[in-house]
Amino acid sequence: MKRFDNKVVIVTGAGSGLGQAATLQLAEEGAKLVLVDLSEAGLQETQQKVLAIAPQAETLLITANVADEQAVKGFVDATVEKFGQIDGFFNNAGIEGKQNLTEDFGIDEFEKVISINLNGVFYGMKYVLKIMKKQGYGSIVNTASVGGIRGVGNQSGYAASKHGVVGLTRNSAIEYGQFGISVKAIAPGAIMTPMVEGSLRQMGGDNWEEVGKEFVKPNPMRRFGKPEEVGYLVAFLLSNHADFINGVVVPIDGGQSYKY
Ligand code: NAD
């Protein structure tokens, strides 16, 4: 018996990076998966990878923008319609936004990052928690960031949104524990995904790999994290093995957040 046999998990941002890595781990452990992303091509890629490792995995692909409340309600409704239950929710889609000093951080950019990273996470929790409360069970893992527990700099929108995700996590955790539901967050450090490559390119252009090497020098482990390392953590936190872990924010950063 695998940990996610007969379990249904929704993953947002499933078309790339951490969402894709968690999806593959969950698929290997038997989950039925609802994969949500803005990018249809990303979803197709993830589905192909899922079928390569778990040919009988059941998947539902939904192209949706998490910043659109009705679209979020739509993918939650579609999950219940197809599978009848929601055991786990990896509420993960997010963007970094352009890096800039606070005074130069455009209002439009700020609002865009908040609408996806914070409003999107809230909408997901709002609709999924309603279902989980009726069921009397469920686990939610929100993706915060080291930028949600420490100041990193040049990331007003990102910092505000990810600190907000930590607040939403703690607030709902204490509300919903009594209904058998746990709500957790992860705080990844620099994990080598397309998002991080994009931000290194912003800093270093074609020289981004060199910039990356400098960037990870202060990390106690002297390297970037790997997406699959986050996948293992998310699968554990969404599994029944982590039912009594509630309201926590788990850093996965090689120890860097203790060093800033
Ligand atoms: P990524 O860019 O590789 O993947 C993000 C995915 O989310 C993409 O497939 C993208 O299409 C999707 N997405 C973006 N906006 C969306 C929207 N509005 N609606 C639906 N889907 C949308 O990035 P990643 O590194 O895998 O990041 C995933 C999450 O992890 C984000 O919330 C990010 O802030 C967080 N995070 C990443 C790191 C890191 O080092 N990679 C560190 C800390 C936190």
Image (cartoon, rainbow, N blue to C red):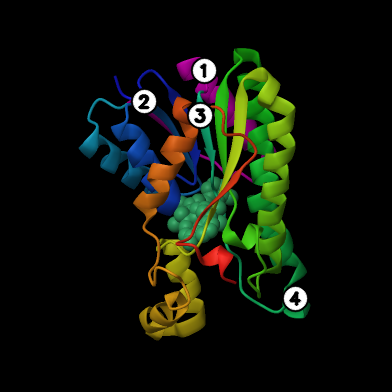
* Residue bearing mark 1: 85
Q: Residues within 10 Å of mark 3 (few under 14, many from 20)?
A: many
Pick whichever of labels 2 and 3 is earlier in the sequence: 2
Tell me the number on the disc at residue 102.
Answer: 4
Cα distance in 3D space between marks 4 and 3: 36 Å
Q: Residues within 10 Å of mark 2 (few under 14, many from 20)?
A: some
Cα distance in 3D space between marks 2 and 1: 16 Å
Task: Give the residue drawn at x 62%, y 62%.
Answer: 147
Q: Is residue 168 visible?
A: yes
For the C terminus, the quadrant is bottom right
* Residue bearing mark 3: 88
Secondary element at image label 4: helix
* Residue bearing mark 2: 3
Residues 158 and 1: in front is 1
Instruction: Give the residue type that dot 1 points to.
Output: Gln
Instruction: Give the residue type that dot 3 points to.
Output: Gly
Residues 144 and 48: in front is 144
- Left or right: 14 as drawn, with respect to 184: left
Secondary element at image label 2: loop
Secondary element at image label 1: loop
Task: Give the residue drawn at x 64%, y 52%.
Answer: 117
> Are the two marked residues, 4 and 1, in contact with CB atoms closer than 8 angstroms?
no
Q: Residues within 10 Å of mark 1 (few under 14, many from 20)?
A: many
- Which one is in front in this view, the residue at disc 2 or the one at disc 4? 2
Percent across and percent down for residue 213 are 39, 79
Image: magenta residue range: 58-86
Cα distance in 3D space between marks 4 and 1: 43 Å
> Are the two marked residues, 2 and 1, in contact with CB atoms closer than 8 angstroms?
no
